[in-house]
Image (cartoon, rainbow, N blue to C red):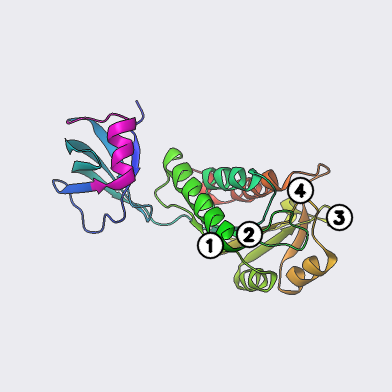
Amino acid sequence: MTLPVHWVESLAGVVPGDLVEVEGDEAHHAVAVRRLRDGERLVLTDGAGTTLTGVVRATGKRRLTVEVGDVVNQPEPEPRVTVVQALPKGDRGELAVEVLTEVGVATVVPWAAARSVAVWRGDRAEKSLGRWRAIAREAAKQSRRSWFPQVEPMATTPGVCDLVGRAELAVVLHEDATTALASLAVPARGSVVVVVGPEGGLTDDEVAAFTDAGAHAVRLGDEVLRTSTAGVVAVAALLARTGRWAR
């Protein structure tokens, strides 16, 4: 049976035999929802490369004590993939974050594109960003990731251009592009950036800004994908040609 996975803020320095305290919402979920009890096994991760298998030794209303068994430290997977996701309407942004996490991206950057239907301002921006981060964390646990993705604050177009300029490979998905994504060489290490436009498409100025910064305008195929699914398809196509998916 697959062991349940729970997150703790830090596992730095833990060794077999140590006791780790899990508190707050994570402990409540383990005890009240999953009903873990003394003697049951589970997995703890700090989302920063350290994962352990342990045994429950005590439970409380919002507290869980775990005796550490095996400890594994995993290096961060490379290349690191960042997806710049234009704000979609409705809950499609949350779907995008979930599947991007499952496929293995390192960073998700929400972006206020010129034609984005959704608008993040004030309290809504803070609440939406918090929701994306919570979804990323839950999806990372579900997919048993040792490294959890980062969801960055909303970026402007100049901010995205800066990300593009620092990447070993950057692509912007565009239905009118003549270059196929599959024709590009994918670096084994470093940073890969994928820019996904909104439902209304990218403006000519946005495409020009990204390509001037060093991105390749690429197409996935004849089909036009939704903004919530285009990113995961592009990332999968890229990772399939790296050592990350060769094992």
Q: Residue furthest left?
A: 17
Q: CA distance from mark 4 to mark 3?
A: 10 Å
Labels 4 and 3: the sequence-earlier one: 3
Q: In the displayed structure, would residue 123 be above or below residue 238?
A: below
**Within-10-Å neighbours for mark 3: few <14, some 14–19, many 20+:** few
Q: CA distance from mark 1 to mark 2?
A: 14 Å
Question: For the residue carrying disc 1, how many other residues have a C-alpha within 10 Å: few (<14), some (14-19), or many (20+)?
Answer: some
Amino acid, disc 4: Leu
What residue sits right under mark 1 in the picture?
Answer: 152
Badges 1 and 2: C-beta atoms under 8 Å apart? no
**Inter-mark Cα distance, 4 to 1:** 26 Å
Magenta span contains residue 29: yes
Amino acid type, mark 3: Asp
Q: Which mark is residue 120?
A: 2
Is 127 in front, or is 164? 127
Where, quadrant-wise, is the N terminus in this rendering? Answer: top left
- Which residue does the numbered mark 4 point to in the structure image? 220
- Which corner quadrant of the image does residue 190 belong to? bottom right
Q: Which residue is mark 3?
A: 176
Q: Nearer the viewer, mark 2 or mark 4?
A: 2
**Residue type for callout 1:** Glu
Q: Secondary structure at mark 4?
A: loop
Q: Which of the pair 64/42 is nearer the observer?
A: 64
**First in sequence: mark 4 vs mark 1:** 1
